[in-house]
């Protein structure tokens, strides 16, 4: 299956600098969005460190499948799935260790979402509240589950739409890279179909643009660069209170 892709990031309308990072490693069919936190420049450091560490690990394991991994492969996981999990865990360790050594980086962290396409399978890995969606046959489906305080409350208490809207701690995440020495990585696998579009984004998009509105934009089709710009423009029109990052990947027949 052939992949076409595009990505954009924007500082938004309220922030002074952009702490999001994105990478499109097209040769490896690996796509990453990270949303840094920590204030000043440290959030940007964490997000950039996460995507570069992940890419470095993927390149090393692609070139030498006998290379020693930083963590033992978990039983029951497929090799390519384990690459996603291990790359994210390695990113977490480097961020945590860097923050421990440098007081100016103390408290830095980042979310991360990853899609890795190989052998007609898409592996999705994530930590935090950045998201991956799949747009198929006109329907937008959220594939990841937010690691956030709001999502925990929704699952425990079945909040109404009004209670969700009024929830005072929407931006509090309960899992991120760099928070602890180790991290739990959620991973799943998908079977892409021709015509599918995968959307990776930071919460600067998902927090400002509703799922139905995203679907309406994606329904237009056309150039992925243009669709990325439209999604970001809509988030800014709705307030743009955070940095906004989007990657779109379209699956096409060979």
Image (cartoon, rainbow, N blue to C red):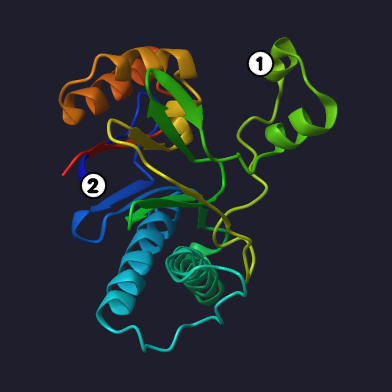
Q: Which mark is first along the chain, 1 or 2?
A: 2
Q: Which residue is depicted at the point 41% across and 13% down?
A: 213
Give the residue displayed 31% in from the left and 66% down from the top. 55
- Kindly identify which numbered label has been placed on residue 165: 1
**Is 39 left, or right, of 26 in this rendering?**
right
Task: Give the left or right position of residue 117, taking residue 74 as reference.
Answer: left
Residue 54 quadrant? bottom left
Picture residue at 34% right of the left edge, 37% below the top: 193
Where is residue 158 drawn, in percent x and y? 80, 23
Between marks 2 and 1 in the image, the one whose residue lies nearer the viewer: 2
Query: In the image, is residue 100 above or below residue 169?
Result: below
For the residues bearing labels 2 and 1, Cβ distance under 8 angstroms: no
Q: Is residue 235 left or right of residue 157?
A: left
Q: Residue at x 35, y 58 (%)?
A: 48
Give the x, y percent position of residue 233: 29, 19
44 to 242, vertically: above or below? below
Dot 2: what SS?
loop
Q: Element type at marker 1?
A: helix
User: Which residue is identified by label 2?
Assistant: 1
Q: Quadrant of the C terminus?
A: top left
Q: Is residue 73 above or below residue 217?
A: below
Task: Using the rendered image of the protein, determine whether residue 210 is visible from the camera's viewpoint.
Answer: no
Total numbered labels placed on residues in the image: 2
For the question of whether residue 80 can be seen, the reply is yes
- Quarter where residue 196 is shown: top left
Image coords of residue 225 (percent x, y): 18, 30
Residue 18 spot, x, y in % from top left: 34, 41
Distance (Cα) linking label 2 and label 1 = 40 Å
Residue nearest the observer in this picture, 103 or 216: 216
Label 1: few (<14), some (14–19) or many (≥20) C-alpha neighbours in 10 Å = few
Tell me if mark 2 has few (under 14), some (14-19) or many (20+) residues whose alpha carbon lies within 10 angstroms of its own.
some
119, 184: nearer the viewer:
119
């Amino acid at each position: 299956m052939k992949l076409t892709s595009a990505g954009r990031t924007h500082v938004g309308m309220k922030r002074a600098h952009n702490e999001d990072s994105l990478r499109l490693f097209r040769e490896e069919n690996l796509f990453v969005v990270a949303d840094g936190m920590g204030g000043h420049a440290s959030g940007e450091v964490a997000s950039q460190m996460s995507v570069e560490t992940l890419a470095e690990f993927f390149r090393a394991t692609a070139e030498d499948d006998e290379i020693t991994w930083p963590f033992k492969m978990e039983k029951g996981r497929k090799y390519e799935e384990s690459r996603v999990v291990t790359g994210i865990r390695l990113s977490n360790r480097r961020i945590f260790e860097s923050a421990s050594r440098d007081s100016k980086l103390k408290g830095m962290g980042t979310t991360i979402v990853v899609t890795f396409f190989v052998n007609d399978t898409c592996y999705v890995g994530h930590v935090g509240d950045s998201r991956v969606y799949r747009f198929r046959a006109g329907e937008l489906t959220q594939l990841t589950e937010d690691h956030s305080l709001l999502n925990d409350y929704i699952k425990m208490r079945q909040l109404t739409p009004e209670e969700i809207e009024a929830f005072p701690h929407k931006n509090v995440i309960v899992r991120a890279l760099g928070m602890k020495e180790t991290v739990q990585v959620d991973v799943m696998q998908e079977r892409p179909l021709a015509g599918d579009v995968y959307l990776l984004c930071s919460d600067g998009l998902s927090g400002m643009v509703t799922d139905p509105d995203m679907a309406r934009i994606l329904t237009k089709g056309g150039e992925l660069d243009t669709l990325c710009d439209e999604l970001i423009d809509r988030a800014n029109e709705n307030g743009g209170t955070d940095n906004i990052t989007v990657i779109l990947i379209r699956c096409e027949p060979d």
